[in-house]
Amino acid sequence: MEKTTRPDLDEYFLKIASVVAERSTCLRHHVGAVIVKDKHILSTGYNGAAAGLKDCLELGCLRDQLHIASGTRHEICRAIHAEQNAIIQAAIHGVSIAGATIYVTHSPCILCAKMLVNAGIKRFVTFGSYADDAFKDLFQEAGIKFEVHEKPPSIITWLP
């Protein structure tokens, strides 16, 4: 019998963030986030319009229509970012994320970075980058550890 390789926890949670991203309604970036503490998933989020409202899949991308570059003018967008939605879901369900790690498919914008600082996130793990790198100084000052890992394989290993 062939032995399978078990992913380490970082690869495992990054892979889950990738699956969460598949729910995105954004036409530019599919972003997924998973907040984890003590090896347990506390919350997930993906980027998309506010609950119950029309999204970019239905209406088209306002940012594309206005020729707005990625990483700029965040306020001109229907979507709530994946990190924001993960924080909101934790709050709705009364789950503290202080001291947790967040796994996200992309690095954060400055707005999400500020929210993560105030939410008490201690570690940010990603495999992708976003066009806004203003978060780096903020994370350093706040003591949030930022790590970039290899993109996890998109293959799911099944036993026969």
Image: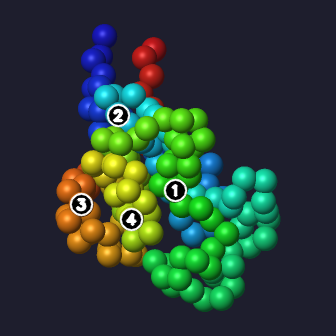
Whether residue 148 is visible to the viewer of this picture, yes or no, is yes
Q: Marks 3/2: CA distance?
A: 19 Å
In this picture the colour scheme is rainbow
Relative image position of residue 99 (x, y in whole percent): 30, 41
Sequence-wise first label, 2 or 4? 2
- Tell me which amino acid carries mark 4: Lys
The quarter of the picture where residue 38 lies is top left
- Tell me which amino acid carries mark 2: Lys
Q: Which residue is mark 1?
A: 84
Q: Which residue is mark 3?
A: 142
Q: Marks 2/4: CA distance?
A: 20 Å
Q: Which residue is mark 2?
A: 37
Relative image position of residue 142 (x, y in whole percent): 24, 60
Q: Which residue is mark 4?
A: 114
Q: Nearer the viewer, mark 1 or mark 3?
A: 3
Identify the residue at image location x=58%, y=77%. 75
- Tell me which amino acid carries mark 3: Ala
Under tag 1, what secondary structure? Answer: helix
Q: Nearer the viewer, mark 2 or mark 4?
A: 4
Relative image position of residue 135 (x, y in whole percent): 32, 69
Callout 2 environment at 10 Å: few (<14), some (14 to 19), or many (20+)? some
Callout 3 environment at 10 Å: few (<14), some (14 to 19), or many (20+)? some
Residue located farthest toward the bottom when viewing the structure as drawn: 67
Decide which of 141, 31 is in the foreground and name it: 141
Under tag 4, what secondary structure? Answer: helix
